[in-house]
Amino acid sequence: MHKIKLSLTNYTAIAFSTFLFITISVLISVSYNRMSQMAHDATSQQFQRYVDDIYTSVSYKYRPITQLFGYLSTSSDWDNDKASDISLIKAIDLARYLANDTLTNSIYMGFPNGDLLGAHKLGSKTKKYYYDAPENANFVIETLEYKQAYSNQLTRVYLSKNFDVIDTTVTINDSLNVFERTWYKIGMQSPNLVPTPIYKDLRTNEDALTLVQKHQFSDVVIATDLNISTIVNSLKTSDLSNDAIRVLFGDKGQFVVYHKNDSLFSNFSDASNNNDMGNLLQKAEFKKIISANLNKNKLFTFNFKGEEWLSQTHNISVLQNNNARLLIAVPKNSILGPSKKMLHDTMLMLVSIGVLFIPLSWLFARVLTRPLRNISEQIKQVTALDVSETATITVSRVKEISDLQLSTTKMRKTLDDFLRLLTMLSNEQDIHSLLEKTCSKASLMLEADSAFVYLKSEKDDSILEPFILHTQDDNINADVTQCPHLSTQWPYEKLRNNVNVKDIQFNLIHPMLKTALVKAGIHPENSNVYTLTIPLIDRSGNILGLLGFSYSECLGGDELTHVMGVAKTLSDFVSLSFESQNLIAKQKELLNSFIKLIAGAIDTKSPYTGAHCQRVPELASMLADAASRSKQSQFSHFSLDAKGWEQLNIAAWLHDCGKVTTPEYVIDKATKLETIYNRINEVRMRFEVLIRDAQIQALTAIAQGECAKKTNQILVDNIHQIEDDFALIANCNLGENFIDDDMKARIEAISQQTWLRFLDDELGLSPAELAQKDRTSPITLPIMEPVLSDRAEHMVSHIDNSLELEAHLRFNMKRPLHRNNLGELHNLMIQRGTINTEERYIINHHVIQTITMLEQLPLPPHLSRVPEIAGGHHEQLSGRGYPRGLQEEDISLEARILAIADVFEALTASDRPYKTAKSLSQSIKILSFMSKDRHIDSDLFKLFLSSGIYLKYAHKYLKPEQIDNVNISEYL
């Protein structure tokens, strides 16, 4: 059986018609429900206004009564045991109150002895008749003195409207008994003001309501009779329709009903059966409705007289601890009648529109299907992967077709942008620049407001730290430091093994990250911000970081799918590129760590060099930065890129790496006779032997008969001379003292003194030490030897090393005849300092070792000048430097910078044992001399001063006592 195929036109027309009728039905239903709800809301608001009006009216009328009871129930003026204790004047005050209160008819008090005191308003002829009052009487004061049953004395005082006494009567009353009255019984149990049930007033044969309260400090009960008509009038006044029912309920079952200008005032259980209202309140079903809804302040319905009523109850509190409830009900038809009429008119209008729309839907469907052939051809081109730009196509007015055209164009553009980005990133070497360009290009491709990158913290693998925050607007001040740290535990932990497009997170932004974007001005403060986050994962499944984009609007549907697909592919390539760059960065970091390790080892090897290898790079970087920033013509061609800074930094850290070959005792040589130890103690021991020899000679002479006194004096003189000679030698051993020709002559003279050695000086020596002595014939002991001498074993020969010989031939440093000369006279006669000529060569030779060691490294092209820069920090512009003796034009600016840093650090260092640290002013003065003698670059020296680098370094590394005032204007 063949399926019936309909054209797209038919399908579209049927769909539009069906949708129209469903829409019309929904609109009719919604309209009716809405109008009904509006009618209910209007009714509820009308009820509430009515309740507010009644509450205001009743509260205003009840307030004087509550104030009266408050006074009567607490005042000592009414705290009496019997009625006769109340004076007539006080009783008249009660009548004055009645004159001003329309709600109150009577005020009376019951006393514990059975007496009764009352003040009554004579507002009608019935009341005047009941009280036997004169025609012109307006008030009556009753006093009942209770003596015994059927023998009570009743006194009535009649008052005019001006409260003047008109007449007084005294009778015996047998019918009044306070103890039997309902109001008295209720009042004795009520410390607060309460109403009594409604009852028939025998005086007027009308329904009555009494308020009672017991005196706070006695058993006196106070009561008032209320004017029922006033309460009914309160219910009448409103903007409710005339057919509305109003029922006011009291706590004791009292109620007031008002309906169609008629009213009923009774107790709920005593409602009359003679009228509609009585029937209403007597019905059990109505009682059940009232009981279920009496305490609910919402609309409810009930049936009465064959129709449905809309009702609501409200609480009205006018007396303390007594709440009244007000029920209001109106016929539902009177409320919903206008809504039903409006609904009928709306249905007619919508149905008419629907009938007219059916032929229009068919016409619209025909127009809609017309451009489909063109769309089909475009899809075929996309299927054939033809994404090249084609002729301009007119955009269809149909959204779906237009979206398809735009999607094809967007696909071609996305592929083009992506390939361009891959090409750009594949040539990028710097990690920061790579991620910056990624964010810049990707934010444009994905139409994001901003792009950001988080990288895994090196200190804590569970934390992602902000790295890049990029915005499309370069004027926006985006501060990545304001971004919060994120955790790698969720939701990225589950993505370690396999990341799918569906796993990419798109949700509301992290609050702290939103704050950062708002502070940067990327997003308004009170707007929602959404983020697209993609984890960056390496080939081992480890999280490298996070790539994210922020949007002001929540993406959805095809747009979100497109963005996520492009972002996922982009993140894969970025992860691969980042991993490669990160490995290169780690290798550089490892190299720098080895460099700093070597520099630290040099400083650690000789603590007397202090932190020289660590301070010089910092000082050199400061001076190089100042030179690159300088506007002076001398430095106009000097600028350092990242590779140049890396080259200078490595050269600075390794400028003294050759010192690893320099013997420690040479670097640390604090005295002239010091080698591995200070040999002054050997010399001292020889002078000690001279003193002992002098003492022995004196004792021998005295024993042989010489004059003891004369001999002892000679001994003392000899000892003093020996002590003075040793003090001179010891003083010359210190590097601070200058040795002139006269001092050399004295040292030479002192050295002529001899001492007698009895022991063989070759015992206990190593083979190398024996070879160093190189004696051809044995020595006969004992033997006389000078106290100071330069012997053959003091001459240390050069090491037969091809590398050292090659280095010697390459450089212009004059090599001494011996590797070292340990001769005692040779070293004591050093004019300045503690280093002899051979040791000076050894120390200076570290530069040759530095160059030789660095040239052995397989340095990349951008670091090829590291040996030249590091090995040139002892060259001088005068051409007298070492190790090559370069001329000014052959010394690079980096080497000149390193030279100033090296000298200034050495001058100001306070951790060298062979010298005292120079003050800041002394160091600057020495540098100025070196500048004048063209040992250092004068332009760099002036920049060193004018830029304030010397002072910045001094505050960081010099002792406070070294930092003195320097007038740099003398040197500029």
Image (cartoon, rainbow, N blue to C red):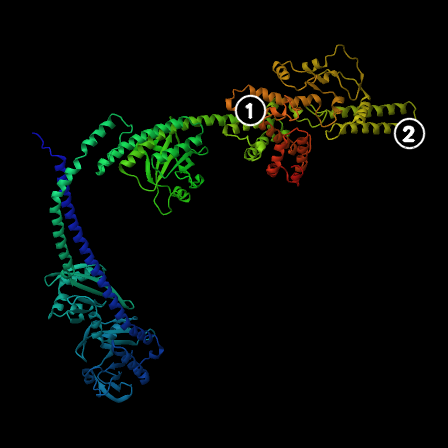
Residue 647 is left or right of residue 583, and the answer is right
Identity of the residue drawn at 75% across and 10% down: 776
SS category of the residue bearing label 1: helix
Name the residue nearer the viewer: 941 or 702. Answer: 941
Looking at the image, residue 447 lies above or below residue 207: above
Identity of the residue drawn at 13% across and 66% down: 280
In the rendering, at what x and y percent does residue 87 appear? 32, 84
Q: Residues within 10 Å of mark 1 (few under 14, many from 20)?
A: many
Residue indicated by mark 2: 709
Q: Are marks 2 and 1 in contact (CB under 8 Å)?
A: no
Q: Quadrant of residue 366?
A: top left
Q: Quadrant of residue 14?
A: top left
In the rendering, at what x and y percent does residue 555 appear? 30, 39
Name the residue nearer the viewer: 557 or 290. Answer: 557
| Residue 491 seen in render | no
Residue 293 is left or right of residue 487, and the answer is left
Quarter holding the C terminus is top right
In the rendering, at what x and y percent does residue 40 appear? 19, 58
Identity of the residue drawn at 77% across and 26% down: 684
Q: Residues within 10 Å of mark 2 (few under 14, many from 20)?
A: few
Residue lying furthest top: 776
Residue 747's disc is none
Q: CA distance from mark 2 to mark 1?
A: 76 Å
In the rendering, at what x and y percent does residue 56 appear? 27, 69
Residue 862 is left or right of residue 359, and the answer is right
Residue indicated by mark 1: 866
Quarter holding the N terminus is top left
Residue lying furthest front: 391
Question: What amino acid is found at the position of numbered circle 1 in the picture?
Answer: Val
Q: Earlier in the sequence, mark 2 or mark 1?
A: 2
SS category of the residue bearing label 2: helix
Name the residue nearer the viewer: 938 or 228. Answer: 938
